[in-house]
Image (spheres, helix red, strand yellow):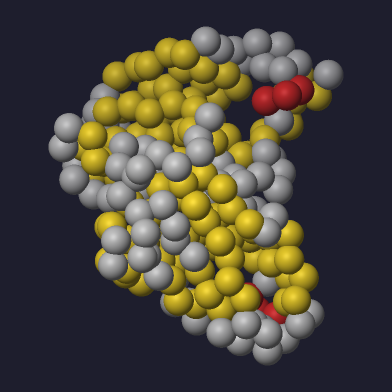
Amino acid sequence: EADIYQTPRYLVIGTGKKITLECSQTMGHDKMYWYQQDPGMELHLIHYSYGVNSTEKGDLSSESTVSRIRTEHFPLTLESARPSHTSQYLCASSEWDRGVNTEAFFGQGTRLTVV
Amino acid sequence: QKEVEQDPGPLSVPEGAIVSLNCTYSNSAFQYFMWYRQYSRKGPELLMYTYSSGNKEDGRFTAQVDKSSKYISLFIRDSQPSDSATYLCAMKSGGSYIPTFGRGTSLIVHP
């Protein structure tokens, strides 16, 4: 079982609020990712990190920001939530193992509703 | 054309049936292939991870990769109602950090 945790699991918040979605992993993985997933739709990569102090934007344009100050922690922040941000947010991690990037392990997700 | 195509379903089968789930892809650089299972309102969990062509078996699950046809499959034998979930394929090229996911196939196994 993967040791990657997301909090909160569910969040309902008003428009304009600032929110931070937390993601932590205890596997020592250097690569971490944030995906957005709407019901019945693909996973869309919104941010990723190769390691501490490294962050990159993914394929999907996002108004969120991320930080990677510690290996185990990769929070995602929305400065001003909008109803269009309503979605499920999934955090994942992976590592290099003998020159190969291992498979990604996912957290349980945060289901965000902006009203 | 998307890099990875996967029929969203739903695929409905009776308990005990053999299930075949498939993905096609267009990027010949893909070398690593994964299948994830995702229950409703949960994160995806890894089922199978294979490299290059061939078969890999794990219990009731068999993953098959045909690189010449750019086609991968997941077979589930003796399907159970607990197998009802969305199955996502994912793949990546050698040295790549970022997998490309299919949109998932919804599977319903009815008693």
Q: Which quarter of the image is occupied by the C terminus of chain A?
A: bottom right
Task: Please indicate, yes or no, whether residue A76 appears anywhere in the rendered image.
Answer: yes
Q: List x then y, in percent, for residue B44.
A: 56, 41
Q: Is residue A76 left or right of residue B13?
A: left
Q: List x then y, in percent, for residue B61.
A: 52, 17
Task: Please indicate, yes or no, whether residue B2 appears anywhere in the rendered image.
Answer: no
Classify residue A58 by image quadrant: bottom left
Classify residue A12 by image quadrant: bottom right
**Residue at 50% of width from left, 77% of height from top?**
A64
Name the residue nearer the viewer: A25 or B70: A25
Q: List x then y, in percent, for residue B88.
A: 52, 41
> How many callouts does the rendering have?
0
Given the current orientation, which residue lies at the most extreme front position? A70
**Residue at 62% of width from left, 82% of height from top?**
A18
Given the current orientation, which residue lies at the most extreme right position? B111
**Residue at 69% of width from left, 55% of height from top?**
A9
